[in-house]
Image (cartoon, grey):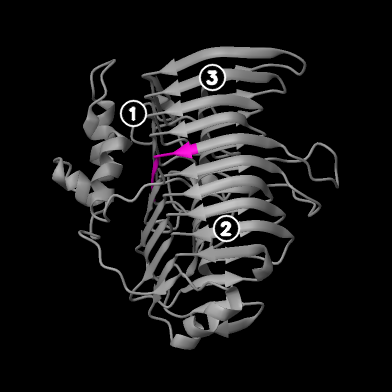
Amino acid sequence: SFYAEERDPHSASFAGWGNVGDVDGILIYGPEGIKMGSILIEDNHFNYLSKGVSIDGKAEHVDIVVRRNIITNSYSESGHAQGMGATTASALLEENIFDHNGWLVQQRVEGGKEEEEGQATIYNHNTYFRRAVDTIFRNNIFLRPSSIHNKWTANPTVKGVDEIGSSNLLMENNLYVGGEIGISAGGNDDYDTGHRWSNIRIIDNIMLAIGRDRPTNRNLAWYIDAIDWDGGDICGNYLLKNDNPLVQNINGIKVNGHSRDVTVSKNILYDLYMSQPSNNNGALRMNDEPKSNILIKDNSIQLAGSEMRPVISENLPSTTFENNTYYTDADDGQWFRVDGDNYSFDEWEPLSADFESLDEKQSYIEPERTFETYLDSVGFGSSIDAFVRSAMDQPTKTWSENFSAKRINAYIREGYGNTTCN
């Protein structure tokens, strides 16, 4: 166990606010020009650190396996804090639990960046991977980050010129609850000259209640951001139930920037609540930067009780729409927005050549299923804190199926008919 007792405000050994220095649990460091790796980090608890696991330096870090660890309560009073941070790494993250990383308390100033007493900031996340390649996140549980669950950056090495900085990433069958943003594969430096990502796959994940806690005191809930992709799939994901009515800056899936050969398919977007249509927020959102061969097919966008637009596009010729099912309670003439103008479904069809899609309200078997109803069904009384404590109380080298993303995601999918990518 990596437990920084002096950083735990509930501990008798707490150092006191203003005296809490940063501490990493495990630091892997390699200088430029070397290749290092073949490291397994398994069955550990990381609690009240500034970073649970940190991979740093300019080395080529390969074959890093992080499996069945619990990383929680990472925070800093003087800088950035992450559950796990990595630079130039090829890694497998499998069956870990990340909870409440990057913060202890909500940011006290709206839009602020104060760090005292571990306040949430926009710079702190459950995971933060820079220029990653050949990396897999599979069957993890990501809960309540300061800002983003999975933040990826692909910063160019030459100022002013975009280049492929991150490639071959797979996020599959993970569970995401809370926070402000689910997956962001688009930051940070972007010179608007080309692609920065190659072969990115976001497959069969479940995201619930993004935006619920407002850690940084902002009013946003963004589920998946894809920016400057050269090839990728966003398939079989369930983007469900933002449940804080104060949060109205909401997007389901954004395909922005210089993107090509991206397929968005078989996703279910359900119960994303907006009180009125927005010109900038939609279930599917494509901006006006150069794109080609974007395919949107077989998705179910169900926004009953919401006035969110199913589609906002500023680059319609780049996109093919096929066999989607749309529904919103926005006024008929407000469903779709293209190049600054609003359209009804009947007007959308000839405009987009989307003749195979339907405007239909669908019903599901048990759409009220959530992470909290799962917790209640296995005896945790809907308490995320109790769930994490119980996971940490497991005997060494054991991992109950009750704490697995596989079981939880299967339970939630059953309520929607078990649609998956494959």
233 or 124, which is in the foreground?
Answer: 233
10 or 394, which is in the foreground?
Answer: 394
The residue that disc 2 covers is 295
Q: Nearer the viewer, mark 3 or mark 1?
A: 3
Q: Give residue 369's quadrant in the image.
A: bottom left
Element on which disc 3 rests = strand
Say few, some or many: other residues with alpha carbon within 10 Å of mark 2 (under 14 / 14 to 19 / 20 or more): some
What percent of the width, then of the height, locates residue 169? 57, 36
What percent of the width, then of the height, locates residue 388? 29, 35
Q: Which residues are magenta?
A: 171-177
1 or 2: tag closer to the N-terminus: 1
The residue that disc 1 covers is 12
The amino acid on which the numbered mark 2 sits, given as a three-letter code, is Leu
The residue that disc 3 covers is 64
Element on which disc 2 rests = strand
Q: Give residue 33's quadrant in the image.
A: top right
Is residue 71 in sight in this rendering? yes
Q: Magenta span has 173?
A: yes
3 or 2: tag closer to the N-terminus: 3
Q: Magenta span has 222?
A: no
3 or 1: tag closer to the N-terminus: 1
Q: Is residue 408 left or right of residue 249?
A: left
What percent of the width, then of the height, locates residue 151? 56, 43
Assign the N terminus to one quadrant of the image.
top left
Residue at screen point 38% across, 36% down: 9
